Image: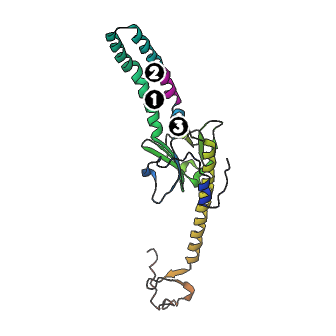
Amino acid sequence: MSGFLPQSETDLQRTRPGSNTPGALRTNALLGGEKVIYEDHPRALGLHPVLFWAALPVALLFGAVIVVGATTSSGAEVLVLGIFGTVVFVLPPVVVMAYAVSSARRTAYALTDQRVIFQSGDESVSIPYDQLGGVSVRGRSSTIAFEIRTAAAVPRSRLFRGTTPSLLWKAVRNAPAVASYAQSASQYYRLRLQQTQIRQDLIKASLEDKVFCQYCGGFVLLSQLNPKDPRCPRCYAPIVVAPLGVY
């Protein structure tokens, strides 16, 4: 999935899917200064469909048994039947269904200005954009796969699946739109990171033949210094250079 390359964060924000749910991601998963640009919970029915749908017919079946028994039994028998049926047949499926819903609420998917995040319970894993190989939707499902370019760059976790390590977002609402947005975000922030690195490299290169004056705070070209009496050409203070091996 290619997505489009936004020209600014404003352009990127305009294409953010409507399924975005502010507050879905717990903030303890964020790094200092990191900004969330998309977050959501998975759909409960899609995350644990077997648990949810297997429990529902059991609850309905024995609920019907209780109703039939209530119409053909005495008052005391109805009470005993109701308590027994609720405890043995209705309560367990309800607990299972509640677990499926709770599990979905404790799972969060997020995109930030630095990485892709999958938060499941107390565990949180992520892929930095510069290690993201690709984003795709699995067939016609609601599962988004984030492939990892360099597996050694991310920690081992049960949340990474497949022979080619991938981070899977399951039961994603409006999965195609979210996947396209994720691809656009990764392209934009990856390029911005590269540009920042280029600027830093240029600054570093421009300072390689200069020394810092601790008095006036300026940089002085080495070619401007008198080796026998190195002084700053602006403030005439002596230039002190640390001995080799001392930084």
Tell me what residue is drawn at x 58 percent, y 76 percent.
Answer: 206
Q: Nearer the viewer, residue 44 or 236?
A: 44
Rendered view: 165 above or below 75: below
Residue 43 disc label: 3
Instruction: State the residue lying farthest toward the left.
Output: 76
Rendered view: 63 above or below 40: above
Could you tell me which secondary element the residue under label 2 belongs to?
helix
Q: Position of residue 121 (x, y in %)?
A: 43, 41
Label 1, on which residue?
Answer: 97
Stretch of the chain drawn in magenta: 49-57
Q: Position of residue 62 (x, y in %)?
A: 44, 16
| Distance CA(mark 3)–CA(mark 2) | 21 Å
Q: Main secondary structure of the magenta part?
A: helix
Q: Nearer the viewer, residue 145 or 61?
A: 61
| Distance CA(mark 1)–CA(mark 3) | 13 Å
Q: Is residue 40 magenta?
A: no
Q: Is residue 53 magenta?
A: yes
Tell me what residue is drawn at x 46 percent, y 56 percent.
Answer: 31
| Distance CA(mark 2)–CA(mark 1) | 10 Å
Q: Position of residue 12 (x, y in %)?
A: 61, 56
Whether pointer 2 and pointer 1 mark residues with C-beta atoms closer than 8 Å, the reply is yes
Residue 59 disc label: 2
